[in-house]
Image (cartoon, rainbow, N blue to C red):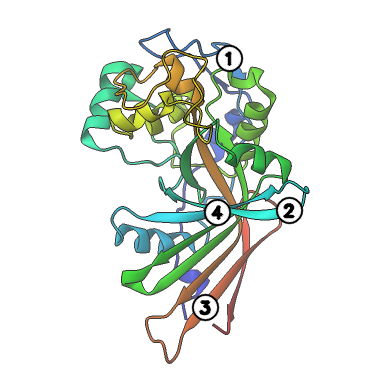
Amino acid sequence: MVPASASIGHQSSLQVALRRLGAIKANSGISTSNSLGLSTKAVTMSTPSNNPQRAPWRDLLDSHLQQTPGYEFTIATVGYDAQQRPVPRLRTCGCRGFFPELELHAKGQEAMDQQVEGGGNPPIFESDMLSFTTDARMDKLPQLESSGHAIEAVFWLKDLMTQWRIKGTAYAIGNPSGEDAPEEKTSRTEITKALRVKGDTDSDIAKWTWQNAVTKYFANHSPVARGSFRNPPPGQPRSSNPNQSDLKLGQSVFDLHDPVARANFRVVVIRPEEVECLDLTDQEDGKRWNWTLIGGNDGSQWNEVEVWP
């Protein structure tokens, strides 16, 4: 059995920082390029969780992912067919780790250092929320919005003979209009509820911006992958001509603030509410644990139960 006490508690001195978080203004326009046209209006950041503890399952999942290079997961959302009946919609996505703790590859960090003031955000936040990226023109985002943001993600880690299921809500960030866009404002508010401050970082909090957080994920893509956000609209007939002349296949994007690509680029953050781990290492005695979030969405309390596999 993996008891809840097995997770590594992150004891932090948070009191000073947390008193100031409610009044913080995060600039959303720091960059060396103005081509993106992001809103530069200062926005108020909601108060992150004052709970210094990680979720009891987080370190175990993290250790499993660290042992699985290039890990991917299956994402399920709720769609509707022609008769407006709810139907499951699944796809495989690259997991980008826990938000906003993405570890950039060398080329990505080099691009951030060259194009983003200070090389990006200071590492002041952590969370139990998993993340992935998507094109805003795909069906995922409207499916999330029409279903109350419901989502489920599944990892099958074959080398470890372990399955993880994460059920909760998901929110997309990256709209160039910033908090002028209602869905962006909602997403930032909901994500902030489950962020945690790491250590005594009071002096760095005001330097952290949502724009830089999203840009880091964009930088983590290769130039060709960034160029995919300048593709013709996904899912449209190939015989149709895009209404924008700069939308075409096979482009490489080196500008982290490219206005066309960034208009379509989004980071999706999953806020877990129920997590399950199925360990089939010993197939004659499989193990299965379920964690359910209780007492709010800030990740403050989890109920752990070992169940039959």
Quote the CA–CA distance across marks 4 and 3: 24 Å
Which residue lies most toward the top here? 34
Of tags 4 and 1, the one toward the viewer is 4
Secondary element at tag 2: strand
Callout 1 amino acid: Ala
- The label nearer to you, 3 versus 2, is 2
Snapshot quadrant of residue 50: top right
Instruction: Give the labeled residue for mark 4.
Output: 90
Q: Mark 1 points at which residue?
A: 42
- Residue 166 in the image: state x and y as whole percent: 55, 59
Q: Where is residue 251 in the image (x, y as percent from the top left)?
A: 32, 23
Earlier in the chain: of badge 3 and badge 2, it is 2
Residue 164 drawn at (x, y percent) = 48, 65
**What residue do we see at 71% from left, 48% from top?**
80
- From the image, tell me which residue sits under label 3: 288
In front: label 4 or label 3? 4
Amino acid marked by disc 2:
Pro
| Neighbours of disc 4 within 10 Å: few (<14), some (14-19), many (20+) | some
* Residue in the picture at 61% in, 19% down: 43
